Image: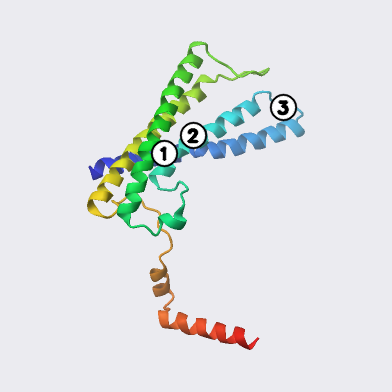
């Protein structure tokens, strides 16, 4: 089971990193368009549509990657103080109440949206039109990958409730470990307490 979870993590990571190159493509294309417009006096009517579609692609394909790294925003003010089992229970409830219905609807509607666009060979409304159906295929693709990663996260929640600790992830991103940091700079708790007393004493004198 753990091999399956890590395999899905690697898939989400690979897709996220692959589509991350769209950021570089966007940068180069925008720079080229600025040069073409203001130096060569030759703007391109399709460029704005291209930029919007590329940005949308980057945004959509980052969802599963971010979820695989546990990087989505949450209310850590309280969540971080809970035991792993409590965290997993909260996550599991939210996955079933919000995530699964929402992402399933996104994937289903996105596939219908793409098929309708493909049938009519939909294009952008500009003097130099671009095909839209390849871009619209990104919606069900991203939704399906995100749904798969969400199922993996649900399995992790169940394992955490059972075992009392979170299972490992592919290349976990760790926050700063205060104890490790103190060991690296050779600082003891007594030194910190002494410094606190000194700061308070100096503040009182002022």
* Residue sitting farthest toward the bottom: 205
In the picture, which quadrant includes the N terminus?
A: top left
The first of marks 3 and 1 along the sequence is 3
Up-down: is 136 above or below 192? above
Q: Quadrant of residue 143?
A: top left
The residue that appears at 43% across and 21% down in the rendered structure is 111
Up-down: is 109 above or below 102? above
* Residue sitting farthest toward the top: 120
| Residue 60 circle label | 2
User: Can you give x and y, in whole percent of width and height, for residue 20 in the image?
Assistant: 49, 39
**Classed neighbour count for the residue bearing mark 1: other residues with Cα under 10 Å, few (<14), some (14–19), many (≥20):** many
Do callouts 3 and 1 mark residues in contact (Cβ within 8 Å)? no
Up-down: is 85 above or below 58? below
**Classed neighbour count for the residue bearing mark 3: other residues with Cα under 10 Å, few (<14), some (14–19), many (≥20):** some
The first of marks 3 and 2 along the sequence is 3
Tell me the element at label 3. Answer: loop
User: Can you give x and y, in whole percent of width and height, for residue 191 in the image?
Assistant: 45, 83
The residue that appears at 27% across and 45% down in the rendered structure is 158
The foreground one among 93 and 8 is 93
Q: State left or right for residue 39 relative to residue 140.
A: right
User: Can you give x and y, in whole percent of width and height, for residue 149 in the image?
Assistant: 36, 38
Q: Quadrant of residue 82?
A: bottom left
Residue 39 visible in the picture: no
Tell me the element at label 2. Answer: helix
Tell me the element at label 1. Answer: helix
> Could you give the CA–CA distance between mark 3 and mark 1, rounded to whole angstroms?
36 Å
Residue labelled with disc 3:
43
Residue labelled with disc 1:
64
Nearer mark to the viewer, of 3 and 1: 1
The residue that appears at 42% across and 59% down in the rendered structure is 175
User: Can you give x and y, in whole percent of width and height, for residue 129 in the image?
Assistant: 62, 18
Q: State left or right for residue 69 relative to residue 26.
A: left
């Amino acid at each position: 089971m753990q091999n399956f979870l890590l395999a899905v993590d690697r898939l989400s990571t690979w897709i996220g990193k692959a589509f991350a190159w769209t950021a570089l493509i966007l940068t180069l294309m925008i720079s080229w368009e600025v040069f073409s417009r203001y130096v060569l006096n030759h703007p391109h009517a399709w460029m704005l549509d291209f930029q919007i579609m590329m940005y949308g692609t980057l945004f959509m394909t980052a969802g599963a990657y971010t979820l695989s790294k546990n990087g989505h925003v949450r209310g850590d003010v309280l969540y971080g103080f809970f035991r792993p089992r409590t965290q997993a229970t909260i996550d599991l409830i939210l996955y079933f109440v919000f995530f699964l219905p929402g992402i399933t609807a996104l994937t289903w509607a996105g596939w219908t949206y793409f098929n309708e666009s493909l049938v009519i060979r939909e294009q952008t409304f500009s003097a130099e039109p671009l095909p839209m159906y390849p871009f619209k295929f990104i919606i069900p693709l991203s939704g399906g990958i995100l749904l798969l990663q969400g199922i993996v996260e649900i399995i992790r929640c169940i394992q955490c409730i059972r075992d009392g600790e979170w299972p490992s992830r592919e290349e976990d991103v760790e926050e700063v470990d205060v104890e490790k940091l103190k060991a690296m700079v050779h600082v003891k708790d007594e030194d910190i307490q002494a410094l606190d007393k000194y700061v308070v004493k100096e503040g009182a004198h002022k």
